[in-house]
Image: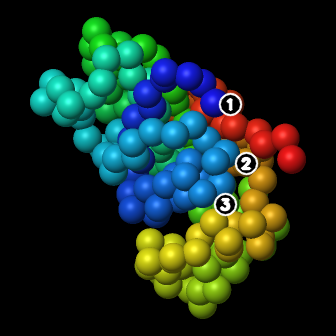
Amino acid sequence: MKKNVNYHYYVEGENEKSLLDVLKSELKCIESGKVEKFNVIQNRFTVARMRPLKNGVVIVLVYDTDVETNTEILKYNIDFLKKQSGIKEIVCIPQIKNLEDELKRSCKIKYIGELTNSKTTTDYKRDLISCTNLGVRLKKCDFDISKMWKQLPINSFQQFGNDAEKIKIYNKN
């Protein structure tokens, strides 16, 4: 774990927030930090949103890449963040194509509902948010952080790269 580094994650929705909270706190496979719901491909950052951030913070942007129309907003946000004096680094993490696809790749499951024992994708989205034992379920499905956020998008999001390795923690058990 990196000493004296503050991380602040911006994620698209409640499902990503639930997952990242478990990955950092329970499974300890990503750097610890605050996780905030803010869709960086749909909404623009403001100075007011930056005020509560600690000086020297590493900003981590986690976003889906299935809708290509929003790369201009993401580009604006990255440029905006680069101009903020208190930000140490910006880490971009594309989800290829979305969270569900990333989880299928990083767990030994064929369909996303297996993770939460859900009958439909709609049920899965609701069930993941309310899941009180997500860490246990991820372990049961052989979750592997090395397979999560591994790919580079093959669309217009490719220009932003994939810095996921910067926040991953590999346990040596």
> Is the residue marked by circle 2 packed among few (<14), some (14-19), or many (20+) residues within 10 Å?
many
Residue lying at the far right in this picture: please name it: 173
Task: Tell us which disc is closer to us: 3 or 2.
Answer: 2
Q: CA distance from mark 3 to mark 1?
A: 16 Å
Q: Is residue 112 left or right of residue 93?
A: right
Q: Mark 2 or mark 1, which has the lower sequence index?
A: 2
What residue sits right under mark 2 in the picture? Answer: 145
Amino acid at pointer 2: Ile
Amino acid at pointer 1: Glu
Q: Mark 3 or mark 1, which has the lower sequence index?
A: 3
Judge whether 127 appears above or below 64 on screen.
below
Q: CA distance from mark 2 to mark 1?
A: 10 Å
Q: Position of residue 91 (x, y in %)?
A: 51, 26
Q: Position of residue 54 (x, y in %)?
A: 30, 24
Q: Judging from the image, what secondary structure is the residue with disc 3 in? A: helix
Q: Mark 3 or mark 2, which has the lower sequence index?
A: 3
What residue sits right under mark 3 in the picture? Answer: 103
Instruction: Please give the label number shown on residue 165.
Output: 1
Task: Residue 57: name its quadrant.
Answer: top left
- Decide: marks 3, 2 in contact (CB < 8 A)? no
Q: Position of residue 64 (x, y in %)?
A: 50, 48
Q: Which quarter of the image is occupied by the N terminus?
A: top right
Q: Is residue 98 visible?
A: no
What colouring style does the render use?
rainbow
Q: CA distance from mark 3 to mark 2?
A: 10 Å
> Is the residue marked by circle 1 packed among few (<14), some (14-19), or many (20+) residues within 10 Å?
some
